[in-house]
Amino acid sequence: MATKPSRELETFPNPAADRDYEIEFDCPEFTCLCPLTGQPDFAKLHISYIPGDLCLELKSLKLYLWSYRDEGAFHEKVTNQVLDDLVAAANPRFMEIRAEWNVRGGITTWVTASHTDEEWENS
């Protein structure tokens, strides 16, 4: 298995696809770079989702998040990009990402982005 950053997200079959249940991940060591200063930005990501037919594999998630370490991105963009990529990989019934960005210039930022599968929402 890879031991370097990767944007490839792996999944596995949901062992209880007939039931709605929630999976939560706390990722307290997310790092990217400020696109204006090049200095590191640190965040705690809380990922919560109701899987459809697939679940996210944890090691690939760790390597995926690690891949942002040397990339410049605004808080809002990176939070939404992570959501888009995880949804594309796992096609969950529901997913929410809450990014709690560390203080920078005396301001703490929280960015929350969510996705709901239309078929699931209307069922």
Image (tube, helix red, strand yellow):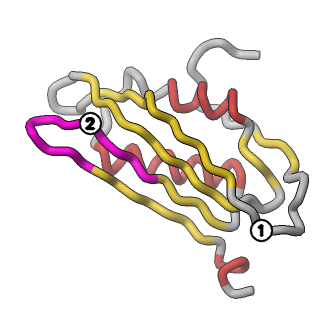
Q: Which residue is farthest top? A: 3
In the rendered image, the vertical position of residue 57 relative to residue 54, given as above or below: above
Numbered label attached to residue 20: 1
Q: Amino acid at mark 1?
A: Asp
Q: Is residue 51 highlighted in magenta?
A: no
Figure quadrant of residue 112: bottom left
Span colored in magenta = 98-109
Q: Amino acid at mark 2?
A: Asn
* Quadrant placement of the C terminus: bottom right
Q: Secondary structure at mark 2?
A: strand
**With 70 as the anchor, is 58 left or right in this view?**
right
Figure quadrant of residue 117: bottom right
Q: Earlier in the sequence, mark 1 or mark 2?
A: 1
Label 2: which residue? 102
Q: Position of residue 111 (x, y in %)?
A: 34, 54
Which residue appears at 34% of the width and 45% of the height?
Answer: 100
**With 63 as the anchor, is 18 left or right in this view?**
right
Numbered label attached to residue 92: none
Q: Main secondary structure of the magenta part?
A: strand
